[in-house]
Amino acid sequence: MRMRKKKNLAPRMERCARLLIQDPQKLLGHWRDLMPDARELRLELGCGKGRFTAGTAAGEPDVLLIAVEVVPDAMVVAMERCMAAGLTNTFFIDANADRLPSFFAPGEVDRIYLNFSDPWPGNRHAKRRLTHGNFLRLYRQVLKMGGQIHFKTDNQPLFEFSVEEIPQFGFQLSQVTRNLHEHGPVGIMTDYEAKFYEQGLPINRLVATMVPWEEPFPTDLKTVKNRWLDVFASDVSEKDLGERVLSEGNFLWHLFSWKLVPCLEGDAARQALAETSEERYLFYYEYPPEGVPLIRSVMLEDLSALPVDQGAVPGADWYVVDKDFTWTYAQPHEEECGPYFCRREN
Ligand SMILES: C[S@@+](CC[C@H](N)C(=O)[O-])C[C@H]1O[C@@H](n2cnc3c(N)ncnc32)[C@H](O)[C@@H]1O
């Protein structure tokens, strides 16, 4: 949301301090302590100025509603609305939604609202859409089984993308409509929605219910590489990534050798790999040896038999990850470098 910078943000936030959760990590697994009788714990991601937040919290006083918003200038308006209405069942987190698993324990959340999320048109920024698979994986980490995502948008391309994307990550769609208010207003409107409704624009809505699902390990190298970078290089600037890792003559493991992300090295890395117990997958990226599968499931014993030096298999760097990409091990072709072991942070 592009907003003019709000005047007096600090004192206004201060006046709403009762509603702001300063340290959401500390409540991990304990959010219901805020409201022990709460029937459900729900999140709203990207609450903006909070018309929906305040309306929903007022309409369902037995539900604990946590609104997450990355732009404090918008969030303060939402907080003021909830303060003015005297609501005690809604709280705010000033953070990016990609941090959810560090705030909420597995299964702690009953429902997630995504209202008029930024559409991020074009493929280049698709990963930033709140209905992209990368976010859906995070939602799976905090939602209870059978928990739901309630999604509304005016944006047709975003809706069509979401209708395709969401079921691929273990959610069943229901209540899919491309004209929610066709026969008159339905449910609580957001600020954006009220504006679009007045203009006569159709609103799309769907509900997605989480069902048991296991993500298959990808079978093509491009997907593996992209997922690897999404997870292990998520905090690295585009500049560093472009110049030091992805440009000609560089390698994925340069992420570690340039110390762009923290990792273990040498014997400590070997030891960390030996202590892993999940399913392990090996992939070659740069200069894979001929005739060898580029991606395969491996046991620890298979790995100890692999050559690590240039002489044996020229240029063959190899990487190991667990099925969910929670850790990776990188064996560079340069004998004096690595190996490296990195565990992703939530
Ligand atoms: C288009 S506005 C919609 C606001 C509100 N939901 C409504 O319908 O009126 C999208 C909001 O989502 C917030 N947002 C976008 N990406 C976010 C993210 N990754 N984490 C938290 N908030 C996000 C933006 O700052 C903005 O306030």
Image (spheres, rainbow, N blue to C red):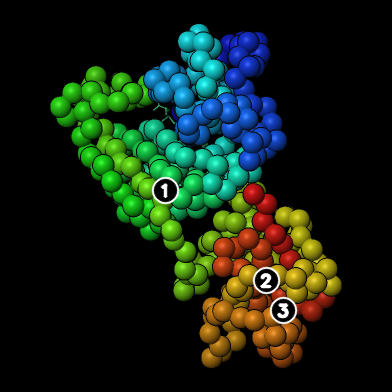
Residue 111 point in image, percent of width and height: 44, 38
User: Does the CB distance between marks 3 and 1 fall below 8 Å?
Assistant: no
- State the SS at label 2: loop
- State the SS at label 1: strand
Residue 203 appears left or right of 69: left
Image vertical order of residue 22 relative to residue 81, above or below: below
First along the sequence among labels 3 and 2: 2
Q: Which one is closest to the eye, mark 3 or mark 2?
A: 2
Residue 127 in view in this figure: no
Give me the residue at 66% from left, 66% from top. Answer: 328
Residue 331 point in image, percent of width and height: 71, 75
- State the SS at label 3: loop
Report which residue position mark 1 lands on.
146
Q: Amino acid at mark 3?
A: His
Name the outermost residue toward the top: 84
Q: How far apart are the alpha carbons under marks 3 and 1?
A: 46 Å
Residue 76 point in image, percent of width and height: 55, 18
Give me the residue at 56% from left, 68% from top. Answer: 323
First along the sequence among labels 3 and 1: 1
Report which residue position mark 2 lands on.
277
Q: How far apart are the alpha carbons under marks 3 and 2?
A: 25 Å
Image vertical order of residue 167 relative to residue 114, above or below: below
Give neighbour class at mark 3: few <14, some 14-19, many 20+ (Cα, 10 Å).
many
Residue 44 point in image, percent of width and height: 47, 32
Q: Amino acid at mark 2?
A: Ser
Give neighbour class at mark 1: few <14, some 14-19, many 20+ (Cα, 10 Å).
some
Q: Amino acid at mark 1?
A: Gly
Report which residue position mark 3 lands on.
333
